[in-house]
Amino acid sequence: MNPQLRHRLLAEAAVESHAHPADVGRAVSFGMHAYRHRLRTVYLVTSVVWSVVLITAFLLHPAFRALGDAGGALPATTASSTPSAPTPTSTPGSAAVLSSISIVPGMVRLAPGTTAELRVVGNFGDGSTGAVTGVPSWTSSDDSVVTVSSDGIVTAIGVGATATITATIDDFSDTAPVIVDPQALVSLSIRSVESSSTTFQKDLEDDGQATLTRGLDATLVADGAYNDESSRPVNDAAWASDDQSVATIDAAGYVQAVAPGTARISATSAGAEGTLVVATITIEVTDVIVD
């Protein structure tokens, strides 16, 4: 037995023997029990103190915080006593660094008087594209051809010309051409401006067909609709009748009903890029007076 422990037990036994001199064995047993109780108390108190110390160290010490963040793995250490600076895995912010901007769409073709919307996308250092945080400023190389608003809306003003639109954010810029097509005829429609038949014009407006009694006449006009959403009479339209034995028409659009039958009257004019725009009506010539 450890001499110190033996000494403590004998001391406890001596105290107990003074209280109970007739029972020395009981005194020794009581002394051992009291000593063990004190040992357990010391052990419990020590355990609690160490637990508090470890928890405090875990919460406050950077090394232990790193241990918790790493899921239990201790941070790597080196033999040097001087802490080394952390090595970055990549250039700071490289994935989000703006390298250039682009206007979308990169080219616009518009008819006179029409509009389109342009926007800016960013090209980033990691190869990705996306929205940019800055607000672009927009300019046009020629406001008489194309204007651009502060939010990137372009409007075609000129005819048959091109303007360059520039978007700028900080030190980055991009350009996009906007081509304004020449004014071009899109469609034709035929109407009567004068007729010796009182019902001719109304019938023509209803379904593109009308009746003329033989010997009567009418004057026709071709109205053109253009790619700039305007409309006006087409004075140079070419007129033709597919059956002049029934109805004739001259270059000014003057129609004469010649004989009973059906004739198709057409007006033709040039459209965009060499195309032809054609409109037709049907005239039925009768011997019966219909008005």
Image (spheres, rainbow, N blue to C red):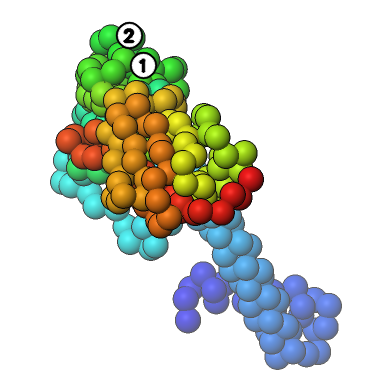
Residue kind at label 2, given as amino acid type: Ser
Identity of the residue drawn at 68% across and 75% down: 37
Distance between mark 2 and mark 1 Cα atoms: 6 Å
Q: Nearer the viewer, residue 103 or 249?
A: 249
Q: Is residue 219 left or right of residue 227?
A: right
Identity of the residue drawn at 18% across and 47% down: 78
Does the CB distance between marks 2 and 1 fall below 8 Å?
yes
Q: Which mark is residue 157?
A: 1
| Disc 2: which residue | 144
Q: Is residue 151 above or below residue 283?
A: above
Q: Residues within 10 Å of mark 1 (few under 14, many from 20)?
A: many
Q: Is residue 40 above or below residue 194?
A: below
Horizontal and vertical percent for residue 171?
25, 15
Of pointers 2 and 1, the one earlier in the residue sequence: 2
- Which of the image's four quarters has the C terminus? top right
Identity of the residue drawn at 69% across and 81% down: 33
Q: Nearer the viewer, residue 11 or 123?
A: 123
Is residue 111 visible to the viewer in this orientation of the structure?
no
Q: Which mark is residue 242?
A: none
Horizontal and vertical percent for residue 80?
16, 40
**Residue at the extreme right of the image, as rendered:** 19
Q: Is residue 249 left or right of residue 172?
A: right
The secondary element bearing badge 1 is classed as: loop
Identity of the residue drawn at 75% across and 73% down: 15
Horizontal and vertical percent for residue 41?
66, 69
Is residue 279 visible to the viewer in this orientation of the structure?
yes
Q: Nearer the viewer, residue 259 or 270?
A: 259
The secondary element bearing badge 2 is classed as: loop
Residue kind at label 1, given as amino acid type: Ile
Tell how many labels. Answer: 2
Q: Is residue 58 above or below residue 113?
A: below
Q: Nearer the viewer, residue 3 or 95?
A: 95
